[in-house]
Image (cartoon, rainbow, N blue to C red):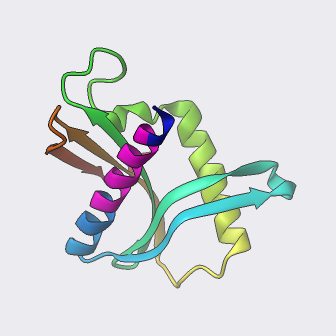
């Protein structure tokens, strides 16, 4: 079961990367692992991309259409607690890495909804989500 869920998430991330590239974004990093003791934070950032001159940290969430458990849309699964965590991870990444030149930073969410047959029903990109 865990393997299938991981594959589901990986497929959603790949779809999100293709969508971002088609929109003109340049992918800086994928699945960037962070371990930063000074900020007491460890975790992973799904996608880091340049959207024009904006450095975007993108969280990808996937879900099934008509699911009775969970939020009505995958992007809604990024609640206040997850948002705080993503902000801290992004801050740590900026300290640890040589970030490309940018005018602004944003935290985006891409929600991918698929039907029972695995077909994509919706891809929702929320720019500067929080």
Q: Is residue 68 above or below residue 100?
A: above
Q: Is residue 34 above or below residue 94?
A: above
- Residue 7 is covered by the magenta coloring: yes
- Residue at horizontal 17 percent and vertical 31 percent from the top: 116
- Residue at horizontal 65 percent and vertical 69 percent from the top: 94
Q: Is residue 33 above or below residue 122?
A: below
- Residue 54 is covered by the magenta coloring: no
Q: Position of residue 102 (x, y in %)?
A: 49, 79
- Residue at horizontal 60 percent and vertical 41 percent from the top: 84
Boundaries of the magenta span: 4-15
Splitting the image into 4 quarters, where does residue 58 fall?
A: bottom left
Q: Position of residue 23 (x, y in %)?
A: 21, 71
Left/right of residue 32 with respect to residue 102 in the rendered view:
right
Q: How many discs appear?
A: 0
Using the image as rendered, state which of residue 24 and residue 5 is in the foreground: 5
Splitting the image into 4 quarters, where does residue 66 fall?
A: top left
The image quadrant where one finds the C terminus is: top left
Assign the magenta stretch its main secondary structure: helix
- Residue at horizontal 39 percent and vertical 79 percent from the top: 53
Q: Position of residue 34 (x, y in %)?
A: 69, 60
């Amino acid at each position: 079961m865990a393997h299938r869920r991981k594959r589901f998430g990986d497929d959603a991330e790949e779809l999100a990367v293709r969508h971002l590239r088609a929109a003109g974004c340049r992918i800086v990093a994928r699945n960037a692992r962070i371990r930063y003791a000074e900020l007491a934070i460890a975790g992973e950032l799904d996608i880091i991309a340049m959207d024009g001159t904006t450095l975007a940290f993108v969280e990808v969430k996937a879900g099934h259409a008509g699911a009775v458990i969970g939020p009505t849309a995958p992007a809604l699964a990024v609640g206040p607690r997850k948002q705080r965590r993503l902000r801290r991870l992004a801050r740590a990444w900026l300290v640890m890495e040589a970030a490309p030149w940018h005018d602004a930073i944003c935290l985006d969410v891409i929600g991918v909804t698929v039907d029972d047959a695995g077909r994509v029903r919706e891809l929702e990109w929320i720019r500067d989500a929080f």
